[in-house]
Image: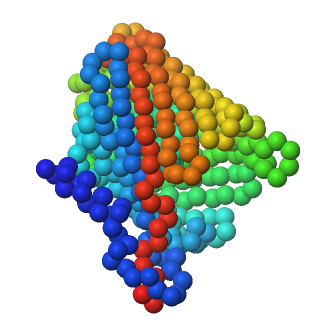
Amino acid sequence: MRGQIGLGFLLALAFGATAAFADGAGMPSPYLPALGSYIQFRYTDPSEGLDTWAIRRFKAMLDGGPADGLHYHVQFIYKTNLQSSTDDQIYLQDAYVVVPASNRLAFKIGQFVPPFGLERFEPDSALDLIDRTDLTNRMVVNGNLGKSFARDRGVEGDFGRGGLCLSLGLFQGEGANMDPRGNGPLGVVRASYGGKEKDSGTPWFCRAGLAASDRRDADMNLSSEMTGLSRKLTGRFAGRDSRLNAFAEGGWGKLRGQAEYFRAWLSPDRGGEIAAHGAYCQVAYLPVEQLILALRYEWFTPDVHEEKAPSLRQWDSSVTYDFRRVPLRLVADYLSPRGGGEAYTHTWRFQVQYVLLKGWRIGRWGA
């Protein structure tokens, strides 16, 4: 019942928000909310188990303020029939304000994704493949942490000059939407350098960087991140949690690709160190603007010290088509695991994505 009420609320927000405001003669204020919303329907056909239909994501976003000035962002998510602990309930994902201090420096305050990783910051509505890697979901800070959706509450400073980008953040460390357990604080830093060219010849871009995080855990459930290890240790982990991320991306004309490497050092108060690591590499080719052909390989080892810990290795291939005149995206994806003791199966996934609203300004001055 709660899920049905939540879905009805988001539908009302997506389709009826502007009905309460009359059109006025004046220009809309940039600080009044602009509403965006999209929905993803997914059909999953595994080689073992039952076929399923699901709402993979239904999101509603509110944005206000100029992009180069003080602005804010709020985002909600709803999903169902994914056999997830976050099914059938609305969750607040983002709620933050960006405060510029100068042309090169800005501060972000509120609830958002800490600056760790590359793929984690790519919108799920515009991925080259159907989903982010399992590796990213496991290894970014707060990745598979209950109901956090990789978010946390804190403050971040972002500095940019030329091709250099530097981010430094301090967070509560318990994960968004989670009960306080005495974890944290969480410190994160990321630096990258890159460039791009669009005006002449073949367009290209490139960027590479490093990120690191550190947190003191008092009672953290890491069992969904480090599957295959003892739940006595990962279910209520207490100790130091340090992580490293290296990434690179680039593109030339119709071809683009990216790669990431993650490593985590978990030093419990009692027992030996856990050292998990993994990487992925993907390429995408766009023969025409609307069509994306993509291929990816990823691997993950939950502990290099534990010989019996099952490692994950899998291929993922995907075909995506974006329609020109309607905001519709179709995706067909095939997942082929290559090892590990986990219940992974060869799986076909088909997804329909439709943008309900994009930048629909609510209200006008003089209304």
Q: Position of residue 37 (x, y in %)?
A: 41, 57
Residue in the image at 56% along x and 72% along y: 66
Indicate the position of residue 115 as horizontal and vertical percent values.
51, 48
Give the farthest residue toward the top: 307
Report whether 315 appears left or right of 248: left
Q: Is residue 85 visible?
A: yes
Q: Position of residue 28 (x, y in %)?
A: 51, 80
Q: Residue at x 43, y 65 (%)?
A: 35
Q: Is residue 60 above or below residue 19?
A: above
Vertical side of 17 occupied by 277: above or below: above
Vertical placement of 250 versus 121: above or below? Answer: above
Specify whether 85 is left or right of 361. left
Outermost residue toward the front in this view: 325
In the figure, residue 287 lies in which quadrant?
top right
Number of on-image labels = 0
337 or 110, which is in the foreground? 337
Residue sticking out furthest to the left: 1
Q: Residue at x 32, y 42 (%)?
A: 55
**In-image side of 320 versus 202 (left or right):** left
**Residue at the far bottom in the pictured view:** 366
Quarter occupied by residue 282: top right
Say which of 154 and 298 sits in front.
298
Quadrant of the drawing holding the C terminus: bottom left
The answer to whether any part of residue 218 appears in the image is: no
- Residue 207 image position (x, y, % from top left): 69, 42
* Residue drawn at (37%, 45%) of the image: 57
How is the structure coloured here? rainbow
Q: Nearer the viewer, residue 213 or 138?
A: 138
Q: Nearer the viewer, residue 233 or 224?
A: 224
